[in-house]
Amino acid sequence: MPTWFATFDGVFFLGVATTFFGVVTLIIKKCSESRCEDCSVCYGMIKIHRNVMLENEEKELELENNVNNINNQI
């Protein structure tokens, strides 16, 4: 009988490791992009506080820049 490591060769483990590290990288990237001011998981029973005012200000600045770019092109 073949053993489990003969059935799953190096390519399989390389694929699993690549997928795992890719998912971890995406999770870290999304966490760093979030606008959370306070995050407590276990003791706060998953409590996340976000500063929405900063997000709104950034969106307003982006809209103003887009309008200015359109006006400059006209």
Image (cartoon, grey):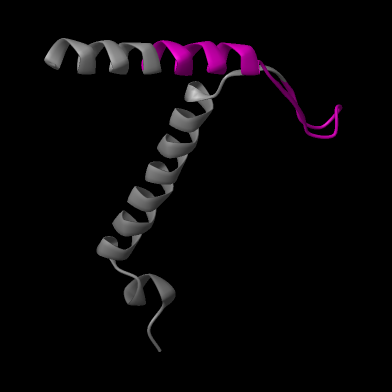
> Is residue 50 in the magenta section?
yes
Please state the extent of the stretch shown in magenta in the rendering.
Answer: 39-62
60 and 15: which one is in front? 60
Q: Position of residue 62 (x, y in %)?
A: 38, 16
Q: Closest to the observer: 22 or 36?
A: 36
Q: Residue at x 22, y 18 (%)?
A: 70
Where residue 23 sits: x, y (%)? 44, 45
Viewed as shown, does residue 30 lie left or right of 53? Answer: left
Q: Quadrant of residue 35?
A: top right
| Residue 17 position (above or below residue 37) | below
Which residue is at the far left?
73
Residue at 55% x, 17% y is 56
Q: Decide which of 30, 11 is in the foreground and name it.
A: 30
Quarter of the image with the C terminus in it: top left
Side (left or right) of 68 relative to 33: left
> Of all residues shown, which one is farthest toward the front?
74
Q: Position of residue 39 (x, y in %)?
A: 71, 22
Q: Does 13 sit left or right of 56 as displayed?
A: left
User: In the rendered image of this protein, does residue 64 appear above or below residue 47?
Assistant: above
Instruction: Give the residue furthest to the bottom.
Output: 1
Is 45 covered by the magenta stretch?
yes
**Residue drawn 43% across the image and 48% down it:** 20
- Answer with left or right where residue 44 lies relative to residue 23: right
Rendered position, 65 above or below 20: above
Snapshot quadrant of residue 15? bottom left
